[in-house]
Amino acid sequence: DADPAVGTIGDYIGVSWWWREIKVPARAAGKRMFLDIESVNMRAEIFLDERLVGYDCIGNTPFSIDVTDFVKPGQTQRLAVRITKPGGFQSWTDNPMMVWGSEFWCSGCPHSNWDGGKSVYEPGITVNQARGFGGILATVKLRIVDAVHIADLWVRNKPSRVDVDATLEVANYSGRQAMAFFRAEIREKSSGKVVFSAEKKGAVLPPGGSTVVIPAHYPEAKLWDPQNPHLYECEVRM
């Protein structure tokens, strides 16, 4: 416990840096590149060659950063993540709240550098102290895609239990209208059996973002419940 930032109960308070060298293949030139970060605690600032390329203040939730304009395919670069953890609470009880800004207060905090109940509020953000550690909690991936690509996919329920909509968000960075062909499949998760398939031809994708919907109908669809957790997977190719 020699490190004052860690303390006697394991809470890390302050700043930590995480970095590594990366080299994106030269053949990726002309592609779109996104850095997908699954979870950090708490504020993350992302740097590429010492240049700030994005940040997130929520903590513990996934976020993506478009790094296309900062990546140099074929060259070695340094990717660095700066994590700031303003407080922590090493307990299974309900976590107290704190204000993170020019000043902050915390009721019942165990650390001597906090005011333990000081009723002072300055402009800032109210955050949950959450877990008593700071850093990168899950995967960090560099995703390389074409100028026209599927950015997101989700399945939307309908009033009928045997009907759903496979809903796509499609990004078109080409600068011009594009035509696309989509094929959707729904499978049983346990067996991999395909129970539905459909095609959508001649979809017009304007520059920017657009939504594509592929209706799905499966009369023998089984509902999920705790005793019979029947699940399906949806895959769409463009």
Image (tube, helix red, strand yellow):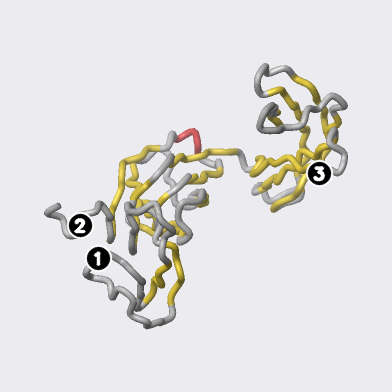
Q: Quadrant of the C terminus?
A: top right
Residue 198 vertical placement versus 118 (above, below): above
Q: Is residue 182 left or right of residue 122?
A: right
Q: Position of residue 200 (x, y in %)?
A: 83, 33
Please indicate, yes or no, whether residue 201 appears anywhere in the rendered image: no
Whether the residues at callouts 2 and 1 have beta carbons within 8 Å, the answer is yes
**Of residues 57 and 145, the one drawn nearer to the viewer in this rendering:** 57
Q: Position of residue 161 (x, y in %)?
A: 84, 36
**Category of crowding for the residue at label 3, using alpha-carbon neighbours closer than 10 angstroms: few (below 14), some (14–19), many (at least 20):** few
Q: In the image, which disc is placed on residue 111?
A: 1
Q: Is residue 12 left or right of residue 234?
A: left
Circle 2 residue: 7
Query: Identity of the amino acid at label 3?
Result: Val
Quadrant in which residue 224 is drawn: top right
Quadrant in which residue 231 is drawn: top right
Upstream in sequence: badge 2 or badge 1: 2
Whether the residues at callouts 1 and 3 have beta carbons within 8 Å, the answer is no
Which callout, 2 or 3, points to the residue nearer the camera?
A: 2
The residue at the point 72 percent across, 17 percent down is 193
The residue at the point 71 percent across, 31 percent down is 234
Q: Position of residue 153 (x, y in %)?
A: 68, 41
Query: Identity of the amino acid at label 1?
Result: His
Q: In the image, which disc is placed on residue 149?
A: none
**Category of crowding for the residue at label 2, using alpha-carbon neighbours closer than 10 angstroms: few (below 14), some (14–19), many (at least 20):** some
Q: CA distance from mark 2 to mark 3?
A: 58 Å
Q: CA distance from mark 2 to mark 1?
A: 8 Å
Which callout, 1 or 3, points to the residue nearer the camera?
A: 1
Circle 3 residue: 204
The residue at the point 44 percent across, 51 percent down is 70
